[in-house]
Structure formats: structure tokens, C-alpha cells
Amino acid sequence: MAKEKVTLTLDPAQLEELRRISGARSLSATVDSAVAAYLARWRHLRAVDDWLAELERDHGPVPAETLEWAAQAIDRWDAARSSPRRSRRAG
């Protein structure tokens, strides 16, 4: 696949960490992979937003209690994902 050369300005501490964790892998390949993951996440979030808008058009507004329940469920899931115990297993 063709690539395009760009110039980036990055936070020095983040760049140092990125270089450390990417090891021998090229910095360009590491950044390209990170951008791909970021874009995939945004495409997914956009698809969820579109789906929720379609549900709301077809079935009316989502009750506030349901939104609150969903927000709490996501917070619990996110906390479990970022717990120190899980991070040690992944590393």
C-alpha cells in the first residue's frame, strides 16, 4: 500500500514512551497502526450513534433511566478493563 510522508509534532514524553514500547518496530509503522486503531474506534462509535438515532426515530426517545443504566454499565466495564490486575496479565 502506498504511504504518504508527513511531519508530526508530538508530546516528548508520549513519544519517548511510544519508542520504548514499540521496541525494534519502526516508529512509522507503530504510529500507522495506532492511527488505524483510532479510526476503527471512531467508525464503530459513529455506527453505534447512527444505530441509536435509528432506534430513536423508530421507537421514540430512550428513557433517562435506560441511559443512566447504560452509562453505569460502560463505566463498570471500562474500570474492569483498566484494572491493574488485567494490565499485568496483558503485559
Image (cartoon, helix red, strand yellow):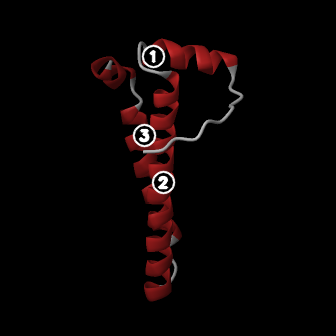
Q: Residues within 10 Å of mark 2 (few under 14, many from 20)?
A: few
Residue pointed to by mark 3: 78
Residue 11 is drawn in which quadrant?
A: top right
Q: Which mark is residue 71?
A: 2
Q: Using the image as rendered, state which of residue 24 and residue 35 is in the foreground.
A: 24
Closer to the N terminus: mark 3 or mark 1?
1
Residue extending furthest left? 89
Answer above or below: position of 76 versus 82.
below
Q: Where does the image place residue 37, in percent across and percent down from the top left?
A: 45, 42
Q: Which mark is residue 48?
A: none
Question: Measuring 44% from the left and 51% from the top, which residue is drawn there?
Answer: 40
Disc 3 + disc 1, Cβ < 8 Å: no
Disc 1 residue type (three-letter): Ile
Disc 3 residue type (three-letter): Asp
Q: Where does the image place residue 25, in percent across and percent down from the top left?
A: 42, 19
Q: Where's the C terminus, which quadrant?
A: top left
Q: Residues within 10 Å of mark 1 (few under 14, many from 20)?
A: few
Q: Describe the element under mark 2 as helix, strand or loop.
A: helix
Q: Describe the element under mark 1 as helix, strand or loop.
A: helix
Q: Where's the N terminus, which quadrant?
A: top left
In this rendering, the label closer to the viewer, 3 or 1? 1
Distance CA(mark 2)–CA(mark 1): 32 Å
Q: Where does the image place residue 50, in percent across and percent down from the top left?
A: 49, 72
Q: Using the image as rendered, state which of residue 48 and residue 1 is in the foreground.
A: 1
Question: Measuring 48% from the left and 44% from the top, which residue is drawn there?
Answer: 2
Distance CA(mark 3)–CA(mark 1): 23 Å
Question: Measuring 52% from the left and 79% from the top, which residue is drawn there?
Answer: 61
Closer to the N terminus: mark 2 or mark 1?
1
Question: Measuring 44% from the left and 57% from the top, which residue is drawn there?
Answer: 44
Disc 2 residue type (three-letter): Ala
Left or right? Give the position of 90 relative to 79: left
Residue pointed to by mark 1: 21
